[in-house]
Amino acid sequence: MEPTPEQLLWMYETMLVIREFEETMAKVYLEGKLPPHIQKGLAFDIGGGPVPGEMHLAAGQEPVAVGVCAHLRKEDTVTGTHRPHHFAIAKGVPLDKMAAEIFGKVTGLGRGKGGHMHLFDPEHKFGCSGIIAAGLPPACGAALAAKKRGKDWVAVAFFGDGAANAGTFHESLNLAARWQLPVVFVCEDNKYAISVEKTVSTAIASNADRAGAYGMPGVRVEHNDALEVFEAAGEAVARARRGGGPSLIEVKTDRYMGHFQGDAEAYRPKGEVEELRRHDPIPALAAHLRKRNLLDDQKDEGIRRRAHGRVTEAYDFAQTSAYPDPAEAFQHVFVG
Ligand SMILES: Cc1ncc(C[n+]2csc(CCOP(=O)(O)OP(=O)(O)O)c2C)c(N)n1
């Protein structure tokens, strides 16, 4: 399936937005976490600064999000992971409300109570969780609801290679296949689960091979390339939409940053990130667009300026928004 010019340009701009969102966050996140704490003997104060708590960024993994979401509509559901920004952006979650949520502001998606791992947007049908593999069962639920209501909506569950060894992965695949649910399972193989290499934790090389055990098609995309992901996802989404049931895609992708910001990354072979960045999927897609005469210097400049403007506006909105009133601390939350 060939992407249309609109889909190609959308994927390119969305990858630029994601990359800039993540690189900006990497900088802002460090505010208040390094000196003077270092002088006080604390190496890294994870509770300090405007974005307290852990931060998992997805720079490098953009092709997975855009290659799949290019096929989705607003009515389709997406569940993400603890590393969720690229999925949310590609699904169309408003950037300003997402940024505000990450900064803990009252204008955020969850009025500042969820933070970066818990972005929920019912309007754009997006949710995610800090619990590994927790997104697969709700994606099956959304797919079951669509099927029962006679809609051609699909659900996509994104998860990591580490999550593919969790029980809910196997339970969800079995249920989705048994009930022929319109769901697409998409595994991001970025080589690591925190510091543990996939080769150490997983008995087989490709999680796509596990699909056969549940009677569904499985495809592995070998390159971190938006066009390759687009092609594999196109078939899987179309199959789900026409009532052909679930499928599983595993994409070989690259995490450019630490598992979390502040990760010393001692487990990485020396020079690994530099080598990965030599195959950056964003210039690769730009080159493809130029070859197809869809991009020249002037157009590229315009797209980059617009992407930069969208990210800057979102951060401005988040940083200038108010914190929630402490009086509403127990509103909208589960209190046991
Ligand atoms: C149920 C559960 N177990 C353990 C953790 C701790 N944990 C957070 S991230 C992570 C690794 C996830 O690896 P992977 O699924 O490959 O995703 P990636 O971080 O590579 O995107 C673990 C074990 C958790 N959040 N939830």
Image (tube, rainbow, N blue to C red):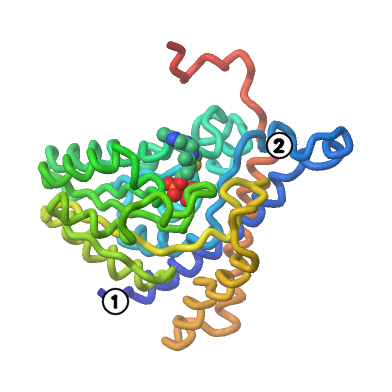
Above or below: residue 2 compared with residue 313: below
x 43%, y 43%: residue: 81
Q: Which residue is mark 2?
A: 50
Q: Is residue 94 visible?
A: no
Above or below: residue 273 compared with residue 139: below
Mark 1 touches mark 2? (CB < 8 Å): no
Residue 202 coordinates in the image, percent (x, y): 36, 51
Mark 2 surroundings within 10 Å by alpha-carbon count, few (fewer than 14), some (14 through 19), many (20 or more): some
Res 206 quadrant in image: bottom left
x 54%, y 49%: residue: 195
Residue 12 coordinates in the image, percent (x, y): 48, 69
- Left of 19 or right of it: where is 42? right
- Left of 37 or right of it: where is 220? left
Helix, strand or loop for disc 1: loop
Helix, strand or loop for disc 2: loop
- Left of 50 or right of it: where is 250? left
Mark 1 surroundings within 10 Å by alpha-carbon count, few (fewer than 14), some (14 through 19), many (20 or more): few
Q: Nearer the viewer, residue 283 or 203?
A: 203
Residue 322 coordinates in the image, percent (x, y): 67, 30
Q: Which residue is mark 1?
A: 2
Q: Nearer the viewer, residue 155 or 206?
A: 206
Residue type, numbered disc 1: Glu
Query: How far is the residue under mark 1 from the one under mark 2?
Result: 43 Å
